[in-house]
Structures are given as C-alpha cells and as structure tokens.
Amino acid sequence: MSQPVRSVAQAFAILRLLADGDGLTLSEIGRALDLSPSSCFNLLNTLVAEGAIVRGAGGKRYRLAGPWGGFEGLRDRAGRSLIDRARPLMTRLAQQGDAAVGLWKMASRERLQLVAHAESDAVMRLRFADAQRQPLGGGAAGRALAAAQRVDDTELARRYAPVRWQADLPFDVYAAQVREAAARGYAIDRGFAHRGIWTVATGIADVAPGFCLSASIVAGSRGEAEVAQLAAALVQLRARLVADQ
C-alpha cells in the first residue's frame, strides 16, 4: 500500500480523539483534525451508523459507544494525537512548499522512524518510502531533534558515531550545526545525508518519546530566502502542533 485510505485514517483519528476526551462537538472535532465541516459531518454520521460513536442527549456532543470506550488500542494519547493532527497540515505544507514533508519518531536509542509523510502533486517530486528508518543522529532530523532535546556532547557523539554520511561531515562541524539549530529553531542538511537533497527539520521534544518534522527539496532548486521560508513554515507547523497538545 503506497498511501493510506484517507477516509479510514480520518475515521480512526476521530475515534482516537474521542478516546481522550469527554465528548466533543462537530466543530471541536473538525478544528482539532483540520477537517471541513461537511467531511467531518459525514464521517461522524458514518461512525454513528456503525455503532462506534454515539451522540449525547443534546445531540451536539459525540462520544465513543460503550464497547469502543474500553478499547485501549485507541489510547496512544499524546503521540498518536500528534500524528493525527499533523497529517493534514503536512499535506498542506507539501503542496504549498513543493516539498516532501515527514514526521519522524524516536523509535529507540539508535533509530528514528518515519511515522507520517506527505508529498506535492508535482510531476517531478521527492517521495519518502513508507515507515523508513534512519540513524538517530542522521540527517537534518537527527540534528534538529538533538538540538530540541538539548543533549550533551557525550550523547551527541554517540548519536553521530554510527551515521554514514554521503559527504564528509566531521564531528566538530556536526556539533556546531546542532548548536546553530538550537539557536534558530531548525536544522539544515545540504546533501550530507543524501546527495542531491536539501532538508530542513525542526525537533519536537515536548511529546514523548521525541518527534521531528522535516521538509526535503532537490538541492539547488531554491535560493537561500526560499529555503529559509520553507524552514519558517515548518517551525510554524511545529508550534501549532505543540500548542494544540
């Protein structure tokens, strides 16, 4: 499967959202998941018809139906909620910025895993492989997450050691780039991780176990001002996701 079925993913996002709340209105659900009123209404009606959710006595608030309320699989809490809310916003940024946008999760002490991605509709475009992994310290994502987590030099060296860069990147330069990322709020990789690819990334240390947003473009396809603009849009997306937690 190259892409998830959007309506199914949206329906499960609604179920997970309701699992963490005490009943929400149509407008509250639509706002949280960035759904249009008509799409949200249709999804809610379908879930009611299938017996997964129920309307409250006043008919305005939706809650999980009895059997679904005890299903722990819906209760990933903060991390799952972040992914659900990020997906539509990432799609919008990918289209507007003509970039491949990824959301990475710290999967272990050694790896980052791609948990969501979005691409533009351009004929020639970059595309992520589903569920791909990379070394924890690798790429712009690894630098941005290290910056957001404020890791010390010993941990930074541990993350750097196993990375196989496609262009020479000494540790002192890498460490300086992490410090720069901490100061400005995002990291940049110009072809060190993947030749021909530039990536900007911003870390999310506020949600366990640690996440990172990235946006990748073809090297040299944008000027410095355009790269900075893409990075700023990514930082704004991060701020919105954290504020909504």
Image: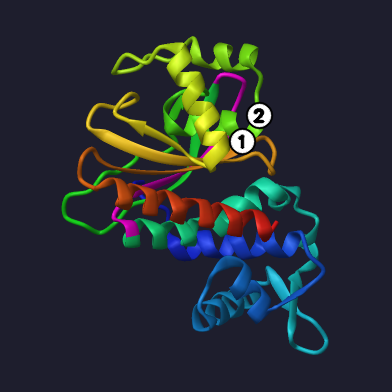
Q: Residues within 10 Å of mark 1 (few under 14, many from 20)?
A: many
* Position above or below: 68 against 235: below
Residue 102 within the segment the image draws in magenta: yes
Identify the disc placed on residue 150. 2
- Label 2–label 1 contact, CB within 8 A: yes
Question: Residue 37 location in percent, x, y?
Answer: 54, 82
Question: Which quadrant of the rendered structure holds the C terminus?
Answer: bottom right
Identify the disc placed on residue 148. 1
Question: Residue 90 location in percent, x, y?
Answer: 45, 56
* Position above or below: 124 against 96: above
Q: Is residue 92 visible?
A: yes
Res 216 quadrant in image: top left
Q: Residue at x 23, y 37 (%)?
A: 219
Question: Residue 13 location in percent, x, y?
Answer: 60, 60
Is 182 left or right of 131, judged from the image as shown?
A: right
Q: Amino acid at mark 1?
A: Ala
* Label 1: which secondary element: helix
Q: Nearer the viewer, residue 177 or 77?
A: 177
Q: Which residues are magenta?
A: 97-110
Question: Residue 64 location in percent, x, y?
Answer: 75, 67
Q: Residue at x 70, y 71 (%)?
A: 53
Q: Residues within 10 Å of mark 2 (few under 14, many from 20)?
A: some
Q: Nearer the viewer, residue 61 or 106?
A: 106
Q: Nearer the viewer, residue 43 or 90?
A: 90
Q: Residue at x 56, y 12 (%)?
A: 157
Is 230 left or right of 177, judged from the image as shown?
A: left
Outermost left residue: 123
Q: Nearer the viewer, residue 138 or 174?
A: 174
Distance from Cα at disc 2 to Cα at disc 1 = 5 Å
